[in-house]
Image (cartoon, rainbow, N blue to C red):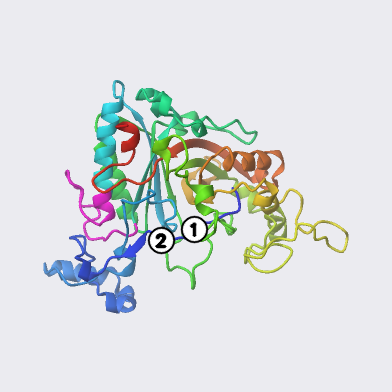
Amino acid sequence: MADTESRTGSQTRATTASEGITRRRLIGTAGATGVALGAVGAGAGYAAAASNKLEQTTALTSLGADAVMFHGKHQPGITTPLQARGHLVAFDLAAGAGRKEAAALLRRWSATAERLMAGEAATNDDTDVARDAGPSSLTVTFGFGHSFFSRTGLEKQRPTALDPLPDFFSDHLDKARSNGDLWVQIGANDSLVAFHALRALQKDAGKAAKVRWQMNGFNRSPGATAHPMTTRNLMGQMDGTNNPKPADADFDKRIFVPESGSPAWMVNGSYVVVRRIRMLLDDWEKQSTAAQESVIGRKKSTGAPLTGGDETTEPDLEKTDAGGNLVIPLNAHARITRPDQNGGAAMLRRPFSYHDGFDPDGAPDAGLLFICWQADPLRGFVPVQRKLDRGDALSQFIRHEASGLFAVPGGAEKGGYVGQALLEG
């Protein structure tokens, strides 16, 4: 749980009525009166639907109209702003399925993702779950696991950066919910839009692949705060301060495989580490606010370092109190995760929170779906996690229960599909 956050939006665009909004219109809304419509809510939509008159010139509200391009240099869902709803799902290729079947599957998946991200219906047997919604910032991202390459006879094309992660002391991993041949990340600002994409892609898999594991996550909805701010996790802490930003001079170098990178099919791609981190909330919530802040090294209310300033202020790691004690303890999470304390290691975090019910004793099964992006996990995630493993004060309140590492190739060209350079190279 390193101290970083995503706030970028270069791939996002707002779809307007003049651009020809698809059949997934938000019935009974008018963009010019969005505030008033918020007050009447579902009633207005029902009245319009009951009249059986579709307002073809009616604009979607801004939330539904936002669309992200599927095609591009990089895949969507990496630098896209955090969405309110997410699904992570891993697939294993079916027995007997190989490179040919994998290529056909990625072709189907890419075509479906392109349509759904544009707010259009799936081509085959659409369920109409998201019929009345717009794109809602939907993104679909695809990756390959270590085992994918042996299953498809492409071992020589497997990147060394995809070597299995080392074991960590804090790991309590469930192998059934870890790794996988293929990985899909879905994000959207509407729950039905996100589920619709999940269902469509699972159906597209057909007999070529089966679900290995699937996880559901959520974040705060856009517009829920008075102004954009760092998201909070289920511990109530701001989670994501100091994330690398595309405006940083070294952003691409840290997050994406360069043009000179190897293997060639991973150029403009990235590597994602996925961890299901359970938060022991009953234990955490017994701590005083001061104790929680000491564990993190930041003020809970503002995210500012304990040494003063605001959320973006650099912590003064040498500052001591009147008793000569470090204001930010040696084992504080914010100290340990600082890039300058880890040889410059950095990663782009884009997590979701999760809640999967309660244990028999009433303890919540809740926490963080940790998702981080980097050009090389051996220089990004691994050194930071090793240091956290050795003495992070937060470790006693969390448990790593599932893990995965996936190679996420660059974006697909128009008319092509994700992974085409690998599967047809």
Is residue 128 found inside the magenta-colored segment of the image? yes
Are circles 1 and 2 on residues that touch, CB within 8 Å? Answer: yes
In this view, 214 is above or below 196: above
Magenta stretch: dominant secondary structure = loop
* Residue that appears at 29% across and 65% down: 65
Callout 1: SS: loop
Q: Is residue 298 left or right of residue 194?
A: right
- Residue 255 shown left or right of residue 60 in the figure: right
Q: Report whether residue 357 is seen.
A: yes
Amino acid carrying mark 2 in the image: Ser
Q: Is residue 370 visible?
A: no
Q: What number is the disc on residue 10?
A: 2
Q: CA distance from mark 1 to mark 2?
A: 9 Å
Q: Closer to the camera, 362 or 200?
A: 200
Mark 2 secondary-structure assignment: loop
Q: Which mark is residue 404?
A: none
User: Magenta segment range?
Assistant: 114-137
Left or right: 254 as drawn, with respect to 188: right
Q: Where residue 147 appears, x then y in whole percent?
A: 42, 27
Q: Position of residue 66 (x, y in %)?
A: 32, 63
Image quarter where the C terminus lies is top left
